[in-house]
Amino acid sequence: MSSSPTSPSPLSAPPSALPAYETKSLPLLSHPFGPHTFHLTQAQSTGETGSTLWLSGQVLAAYLCENGALSGRKGKGKKVLELGSGIGYTALALASMGSDVMATDQQVVLDCALLPNVKRNAKLAGGPDGWGRLQVAKLDWAEEQFSWEDQAGDDASSSEPLKPPFDFIITTDTFYHPPLTPLLLRTLHTLSTPRTKLYVALERRDPALIDDALRQARGDWGFDVRRVDGEAVRRAVRAGLGWGAGEEDGWEGVEVWKFARRREGK
C-alpha cells in the first residue's frame, strides 16, 4: 500500500453524528455535517414517516459528498431533485457542498418539517462556503400530471425556480409500502432522462418488498439497476459521519443503488 498522504475528507472530519435510530425521540435535532451543524425539527406526532431522520438519508449524503458523483468540485452547480425529502437533511447536505437542490415532499411534511427546516438553516447558505441554491416544492407521486410551474409557489427562496431537466434525482427510504412503489417509479421515470443519474438508498427491512421494487424498476419501467459497492459506502460513512466499526451493526443494512433510464431502442 502506498505511504503517500491521503486527501482530506471533503467534509473536513466532522464530529461524529448520531445515527438516526438514536435520535427519533428528539423534537429538535442538531446534526453536524462538514463545517456546519443543521438544526432540524422532527415531528413524531404527524404519523408521517417522512417527518423524522432516517439512516438511509445520512448514508446517501455521506456517500455522494465523500466519494460519489457529487463529491468535491464535481457537485458544484449540479441540479438535484430529491423525492421524499422529509426533514430536509440530505437536501441541506448536498446544497452545503455546492449543488442546487429542489427538495420535495407531500404538503403535510412540507408544513410540519421540511419548509421550517430549510428556512431555519437558510442563514448557513449566506456564508462564503460555496453553498448551492436550496428550494422546496410539493410533489405528490399519486398525481399523474405534474406541472412544475404550479409548484414554484412553495419555493423557499426568491431565486429563479429550479426546473427539469435535473442532473441527479435522489430518494431515500421510499420503498416501504407496496402501493406506493409503482407511483414512485413512475415519478422517477417521468422526471428523468437517460442522462439523469438516479440514486436510491434503502434499508432492507422487508426483503421481499425491496426485491419486488427492484424487479419493477427493471422490468416495468426500463431502468438499469446496480448496487453501489458496499466498501465504497462504508469508507464514505466513516469519513463523512465519523462512524467507526462499533456502529456498523446499526447502519450496514443501508444499501445504495444507482438507477439509469435505458435509452429508447435498448
Image: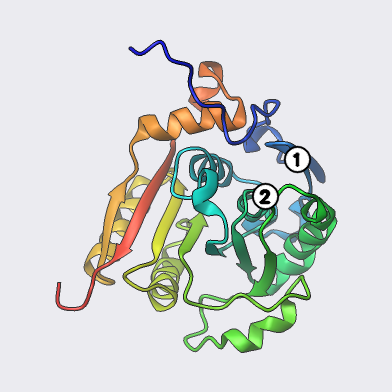
The earlier-in-sequence mark between 1 and 2 is 1
User: Looking at the rendering, which quadrant does residue 135 occupy?
Assistant: bottom right
Residue 154 against residue 20 in the figure, above or below = below
Name the residue rendered at 39%, 33% in the picture. Answer: 232
Q: Looking at this rendering, what residue extends furthest in the front direction?
A: 4
Drawn side of residue 74 relative to residue 84, left or right: left
Where residue 249 sits in the image (x, y, percent)?
Answer: 49, 24
User: Mark 1 near mark 2, Cβ–Cβ under 8 Å?
Assistant: yes
As measured in the structure, the alpha-carbon distance from the residue carrying label 1 to the one carrying label 2 is 8 Å
**Mark number displayed over residue 193:** none
- Residue holding disc 2: 96
Q: Is residue 124 left or right of residue 176?
A: right
Dot 1 falls on a residue whose secondary structure is: strand
Quarter of the picture containing the N terminus is top left
Query: At label 1, which amino acid type do we have?
Result: His
Residue at 66% x, 78% y is: 161
Which type of secondary structure does the marked residue at label 2 adopt?
A: helix
Q: Nearer the viewer, residue 172 or 25?
A: 172
